[in-house]
Amino acid sequence: MRLALALISAAACLLGGVSLAEEPIVIKFSHVVAPDTPKGQAAERFKQLAEQYTGGKVKVEIYPNSQLYKDKEELESLQLGSVQMLAPSLAKFGPLGAKEFEAFDLPCLFPDRAGLHRVTDGKIGAELLKKLESRGIVGLDYWDNGFKIFSANSPIKTVADFKGLKMRVQSSKVLEAQMRALGAIPQSMPFSEVYQGLQTGVVDGTENPPSNMYTQKMFEVQKYANVSRHGYLGYAVIVNKKFWDGLPEGIRTQLSKAMTEATAYNNEIAQKDNDDALAAMKASGKTDFFTPTVEERKAMCVALEPVYEEMQGRIGKELIQAIRQEAG
Ligand code: LMR
């Protein structure tokens, strides 16, 4: 009898051990946008590759559309380890004490994607990601979204049209300064609340790349838009450092490979996704899209130039100069 019991318990231990050994490592990847955006699709691609390359030893759970956490909470949750991976926009790193990332919000900074990539793929981009480590975060890669356009419920063709408008911004001091330079009143608000804020008139307008404006249906509650491409919105994919460093080396290598490929995919689709979103919104006829001439856009950039001086104490004069030089 005793022998039988011992055998049963040994078998149970063995089975338990086997099932424990097979328990996958779970990566919770939270983000705030829709699945059919560049970030949403790249997160899916990362999941697929990560699970494939690790032979199922890693399971990636994606929580889009602020399902799990809103902007600020997701950063806190990453630091606490309740989620392992995020891809917040570069405008949202200020609350982490990494104010330098707000340099990417400076208006009219990048003439094109090539200029942006010279910064993100080069020394400056790498050094910025390194700064996150002292905050318990590892920066893996940059993911593109696109150039922002303005929208509002009154025509916004010239700088004068922005006067007194309440404009939603992300939690970035540079973006607040940008709206003030236009004579507007900035209002910081989590992404998940923007549609309702626009619908109910809590804010009059906002800015975002077309892919976000389209997938969040903001165009349905905005009568006017200015295809100003006045600023850039992109992301850094970040992980909890303790989690990342604690992974078996082989797994980390496979995950890095999956991330490199997901990044390439993201950056390949970002432009087209935004072009398609803009075309779809134009076709809907719900919003009146104004495309400024080169001179009209230049006039807006001139009005926004004081933001650079105002923000150099926050971001660092040298960093701004270095990015401007690389950006071309
Ligand atoms: C926003 O809050 O407007 C964007 O950062 C959302 C996103 O992640 O693209």
Image (cartoon, rainbow, N blue to C red):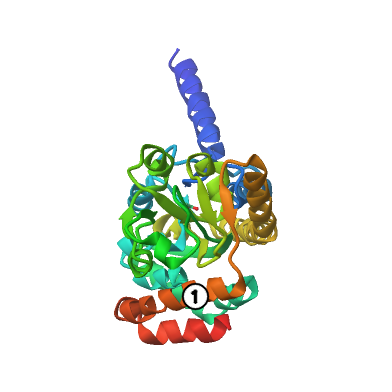
Q: Which residue is mark 1?
A: 299
Q: Which one is nearer the viewer's eye here, 299 or 191?
A: 299
Image: 198 above or below 289: above
The amino acid beneath tag 1 is Ala
Left or right relative to 286: residue 66: left
Q: On the image, which quarter does residue 291 sit in? A: bottom right
How far across and down, in percent of the image, does residue 304 sit? Answer: 42, 74
Q: Which one is nearer the viewer's eye here, 26 or 95?
A: 95
Q: Which one is nearer the viewer's eye here, 308 or 7?
A: 308
How far across and down, in percent of the image, does residue 289 sit? Answer: 58, 53
Image: 139 above or below 205: below
Quarter of the image where the N terminus is located: top left
- Which residue is located at x 57 percent, y 49 percent? 288
Q: Residues within 10 Å of mark 1 (few under 14, many from 20)?
A: some
How many numbered discs sit on the rendered protein?
A: 1
Left or right relative to 105: residue 51: right
How far across and down, in percent of the image, does residue 305 sit? Answer: 41, 79
Residue 51 in sight here: no
How far across and down, in percent of the image, does residue 208 sit? Answer: 50, 55
- Which residue is located at x 35 percent, y 58 percent? 171
Image: 3 above or below 46: above
Q: Which one is nearer the viewer's eye here, 147 or 251?
A: 147
Secondary-structure class at tag 1: helix
Quarter of the image where the C terminus is located: bottom right
Left or right relative to 26: residue 175: left
Q: On the image, which quarter does residue 179 sit in? A: bottom left
Label 1 CB sits under 8 Å from any ligand 1 atom: no
Residue 160 in sight here: yes
Hey, which residue is sitting farthest top in the picture? 1
- Which residue is located at x 53 percent, y 53 percent? 225
Q: On the image, which quarter does residue 118 sit in? A: bottom right
